[in-house]
Amino acid sequence: MEFGALIKFYRMQRGMTQAELAKGICSVPHLSKIENNSKEANVDTISLLLERLSISIEEMEEKEEQIKFLVRELSGKIIFYLKDEIDGTYQKLKNIEHLIPFSKHFYICELYKYRYLLFKGLFEEAEAQRDLLYKQKKNFSQHENYLFRYYNAIFLILKGQYKNADDILDTLYTENDHETTSGEFLYHRALVKSLLEQSGHAIHFGNMALQIFMNQHNFIRILNTLMLLGINYTHSNIYEEAQGCFQHLIRNAELLKEEKMLPQIYHNMGFLQNKMNNVKEALYYYEKSLELQPNLNQHYLVTLYSIGEIHYSLKSIDKARECFQEVNSLSKELGNKKYRLLADFYLLHMAIPQKALKYLEAKVIPYLEEANEHIDDLTRFYKMLSDYYNENGMGNNAIKYLNKITGGIL
Amino acid sequence: MKKFAALLFSVSLLVLFTSNTVVKSQKVSNDVAYSGSINDHPIHPPVG
């Protein structure tokens, strides 16, 4: 505990002058030095000063231990992803926050507060806390500096700035000579690699994280990591491994009362089956996912759109139309432009194909290009347009879209 | 015109064998080509 600052704080709070507090204990200049932390006072002097302020030194030391314990507890709840329990710990820390500025663990506390806000997805508060910490960063120890940069990377992931997040995580990993015992760090590395569509790296870090989580019996994070691995095995066409991950997830999510994950697992299993050309199985899993999604949210929209596409591919036009109409209205409600455009396109294509292709060219493709959609997704639409122009004898336009597919090598 | 058609055919073949996406030949009036990968999916696990 920083007793100098603590004494000054309580002296001022009680409206005492330095002379009043120091009387019979030490000189005023001595007290002044203690308060400014420029002089190390002996324990007896500190005790007497605190006693005059009606504060017990033992109690303060106890509080210091409590702060340390609560920070550790908070960290544990984050590592084990205990969303329902974390608020209790954070509240306990809040109850003694008036003492935190005097604690030796002040910066660590503030850093964990930042981490807690990120964990809870409270972006505005997290941003304010980040700015506050940024002003103090020159005072950080090496470990505190590491935590600050790591949490900034998490902040960037949440903001969707994956490349910047990846750069920070990569620097931290290199600084640690590629050695870390933190499953959480490796999980975030795998997650950001997955979001950057670098599946090989995602699998590499995901497996490392999984090993650590298994050693810790960190069950929720094991499920999260298996999901990541399933996704990236799917992207890498390693289908057997991907199926293994999703089947394991389906078996265990219920067991671990992680029912909220189930619709997402079913959705991803649907994606895998679709990639394997098992269209009917894909439809089965997507529909199962949709049944379990209670809210009309973004995930619901994505699953519904996927079902619409499958019906379309199976030429179940009425069912497809029904899906895309619902996607269209829900995407408007949720303010999701991408799915509104795509649903519009499909609905138009069912009615007037030629007009739909003009719409694709003028609205959908520019939007997808600007949003940096995956080239595999865009290729389908480029091909559609190049075929259209080719068949209508507009060679230059056809080549333009073929060029986009090949990256301009033609 | 024949030369141009031949060139376009070669270009199509080149695209067919260099693209890593399964590109199906189709007519405008046919169904939209389907790859099922335009979504924001798979759905990723939480950041935490």
Image (cartoon, coloured by chain):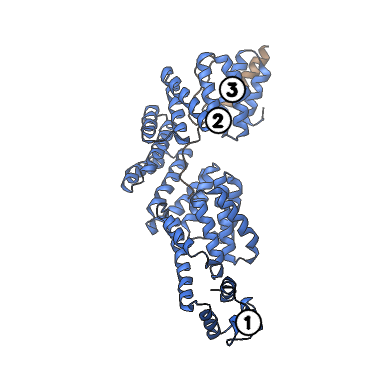
Chain colours: A blue, B brown
At label 3, the amino acid type is Leu
Q: Nearer the viewer, mark 2 or mark 1?
A: 1
Is label 2 on the same chain as label 1?
yes
Q: Residue at x 52, y 59 (%)?
A: A112
Residue A19 - label: 1
Circle 1: is it few (<14), some (14-19), or many (20+) Cα within 10 Å? some
At label 2, the amino acid type is Lys
Dot 2 or dot 1, earlier in sequence: 1
Circle 2: is it few (<14), some (14-19), or many (20+) Cα within 10 Å? some
Where's residue A198, x and y in %? 54, 43
Dot 1 or dot 3, earlier in sequence: 1
Q: Which residue is mark 2?
A: A338
Q: In which chain is the residue bearing label 1?
A: A
Circle 3: is it few (<14), some (14-19), or many (20+) Cα within 10 Å? many
Q: Residue at x 55, y 30 (%)?
A: A338
Helix, strand or loop at label 1? It is helix
Above-or-below relation of B12 to A238: above
Q: Which residue is mark 3?
A: A360
